[in-house]
Image: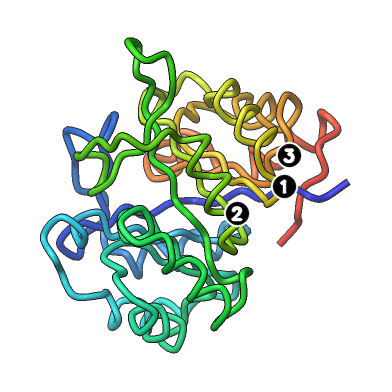
């Protein structure tokens, strides 16, 4: 059985780590490099940086921050936000990123997934899906620009297409559950896993260690990602891993 991963997420806006609820009401948490060093020391399996203002405002890629962070980390780092081209991906990987996360640009130009996976390998290409339930149409739809812009693209159709184009991993955020701290969206995650065969990182809804255990016992996702509960030290990564192991979930020990 594949060992599960625990991944803290750093949502960066204007160079500062922030966190909100359902993508709104953002509050400042701290400096990206400082938090990255902290999570590296606390046993995180990987780290995700998402520049949530880059796509919306066209900010330059966080090259300097990535370089500084890469010098301090001994775990994989995924970078997303504002990536528009294969050239952008190349710059990020050269600066120290292990993987890149594509959302808005990939939805706008799906061929970017194919070009990037062929050039850098599918293991470097993670597709970030911000999905929100539409009660009228009774389905989940993709959102872009940090969850601000709705699309007409159905989430399940998109993940199937993304995998076919060469995506190596999915980072699935349930916008309805994001920041609510009431548990992960198991229904959405299960449907996505029935649709694709690539690894899935679950995001949105973690409120305590039990939520991770339930996630791993009830779905087959490869990793659980969270921000608020780790930033606010409501629960530690070690607590999550210890409880998961007690419940029979195989965990990576860093």
Q: Which residue is mark 1?
A: 197
Instruction: Give the answer, above or below, for where 79 lies relative to 181.
Output: below
Q: Are marks 2 and 1 in contact (CB under 8 Å)?
A: yes
Q: Residue at x 43, y 44 (%)?
A: 129
Instruction: Give the answer, above or below, for where 240 lies relative to 251.
Output: above
Comes first in the chain, label 3 or label 1: 1
SS at mark 2 in the image: helix
Q: Is residue 108 left or right of residue 116?
A: left
SS at mark 3 in the image: helix
Q: Residue at x 63, y 59 (%)?
A: 45
Task: Give the colour scheme shown.
Answer: rainbow
Q: Position of residue 19 (x, y in %)?
A: 28, 42
Q: Residue at x 70, y 42 (%)?
A: 241
Viewer-nearest residue: 122 or 227: 122
Instruction: Give the answer, above or below, for where 33 lies relative to 56.
Output: below
Q: Quadrant of the C terminus?
A: bottom right
Q: Position of residue 210 (x, y in %)?
A: 63, 24
Viewer-nearest residue: 252 or 126: 126
Alpha carbons under labels 2 and 3: distance apart: 33 Å
Q: Position of residue 193 (x, y in %)?
A: 67, 36
């Amino acid at each position: 059985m594949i060992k599960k991963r625990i991944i803290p997420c750093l949502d960066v806006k204007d160079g500062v780590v922030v966190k909100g609820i359902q993508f709104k009401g953002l509050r400042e948490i701290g400096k990206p490099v400082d938090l990255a060093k902290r999570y590296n020391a606390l046993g995180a399996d990987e780290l995700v940086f998402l520049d949530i203002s880059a796509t919306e405002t066209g900010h330059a890629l966080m090259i300097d921050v990535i370089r500084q962070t890469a010098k301090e980390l001994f775990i994989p780092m995924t970078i997303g936000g504002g990536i528009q081209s294969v050239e952008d991906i190349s710059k990020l990987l050269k600066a120290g990123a292990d993987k890149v996360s594509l959302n808005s640009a990939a939805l706008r130009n799906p061929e970017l997934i194919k070009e990037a996976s062929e050039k850098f390998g599918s293991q470097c290409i993670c597709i970030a899906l911000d999905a929100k339930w539409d009660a009228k149409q009774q389905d989940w739809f993709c959102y872009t620009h940090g969850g601000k812009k709705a699309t007409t693209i159905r989430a399940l159709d998109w993940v199937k297409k993304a995998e076919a184009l060469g995506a190596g991993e999915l980072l699935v955020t349930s916008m309805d559950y994001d920041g609510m701290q009431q548990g992960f969206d198991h229904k959405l995650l299960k449907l996505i896993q029935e649709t694709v065969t690539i690894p899935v990182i679950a995001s949105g809804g973690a409120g305590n260690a039990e939520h991770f255990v339930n996630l791993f016992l009830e779905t087959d996702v490869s990793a659980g990602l969270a921000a608020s509960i780790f930033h606010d030290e409501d629960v530690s990564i070690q607590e999550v891993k210890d409880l998961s192991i007690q419940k029979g979930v195989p965990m990576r020990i860093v």
